[in-house]
Amino acid sequence: DQGRFTGKTVIVTGAGSGIGRATASRIAREGGRVIAVDVSQERLDDFTAEHPDAEVVALVADISDDAKVAEIVAAAGDRVDGLANIAGIMDDMTPIGELDDAVWERVMRVNVDGTMKLMRAVVPAMLAQGHGSIVNTASEAALRGSAAGVAYTASKHAVVGLTKSTAFMYGPSGLRVNAVAPGPTITNIEATFASPLGAQRVRQAMAVLPDAAEAEALAASITFLLSDDGVNINGVVLASDGGWSAA
Ligand code: NAD
């Protein structure tokens, strides 16, 4: 059967849960070989058990660890057709006046450094092949100031910069680099509310939220950009949010 990912190797980070898991599952069901990456061994075991007939290489790795990133790319082998950079973490909704260095560093390390390190690691293989597709995960917080605290909001704006610069630089070499900006999605992501001001401001903005989507709805948007269906699309930030960003 010819699926959109038949014969292709795709690295998916955050594959143990939520949007990453739904995306990894969809790629596997559409014939792809999936390098499934997560920090949680238990979640990866669960994912692998659910796809007994698929070609899945499960790898426990923190995407902000250079040695682990090298292992991920080595596991992919000679070719890397796609990278779905989905692993990410939330902040505690603090405004900058109350921001803790540890929160800033943790969120930037995973959401920005991790995303950058995997992009940097797959680009040589993609350039050698003359093709490759990368999808990064931004957020509604990449489009507006009201969706999270300052650390998460800044981190997701940085993901947009990583996406656009790379699309611009390597478009002529056959690479496509896009981002998806999920609206509210039902997953295991944890948001805490450490600041009364942050909680009050963000909760007020959340009054106009659309209903939360299933992770599979995000997998549909991500695999669209990742696959050849997205052939003419490069450098975009695709809101997949049920229309929230139009409000
Ligand atoms: P989730 O917590 O359900 O899944 C994220 C997975 O990433 C987890 O299994 C976690 O173990 C893994 N992970 C975390 N840090 C990691 C690291 N350093 N290295 C490797 N794996 C790591 O969350 P989700 O909601 O599916 O989030 C996926 C992405 O979508 C994130 O980038 C998030 O910021 C973004 N997002 C989510 C929403 C939402 O409403 N759920 C909205 C906007 C954007």
Image (cartoon, rainbow, N blue to C red):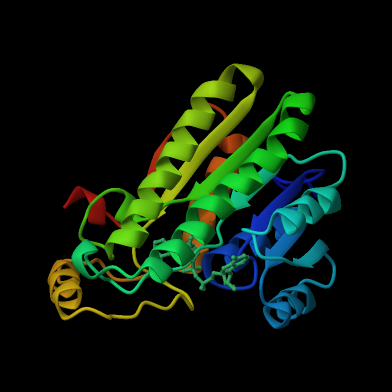
- Residue farthest toward the front in the current orientation of the protein: 101
Horizontal and vertical percent position of residue 27: 68, 55
Q: Residue at x 47, y 61 (%)?
A: 217
Horizontal and vertical percent position of residue 201: 14, 70
Horizontal and vertical percent position of residue 163: 48, 38
Q: Residue at x 40, y 53 (%)?
A: 155
Looking at this view, is 95 or 101 the one in front?
101
Left or right of 39 in this view: 206: left
Q: Is residue 87 above or below residue 234?
A: below
Residue 70 visible in this rendered orientation of the protein: yes
- Give the quarter of the image for residue 2: top right
- Residue farthest toward the top in the current orientation of the protein: 172
Q: Residue at x 72, y 62 (%)?
A: 36
Residue 233 visible in this rendered orientation of the protein: no
Looking at this view, is 7 or 180 the one in front?
180
Left or right of 209 in this view: 239: right
Left or right of 143 in this view: 106: right
Looking at this view, is 214 or 65 the one in front?
65
Q: Is residue 47 above or below residue 127?
A: below
Horizontal and vertical percent position of residue 105: 45, 62
Q: Is residue 17 above or below residue 180?
A: below
Q: Is residue 242 above or below residue 8?
A: below
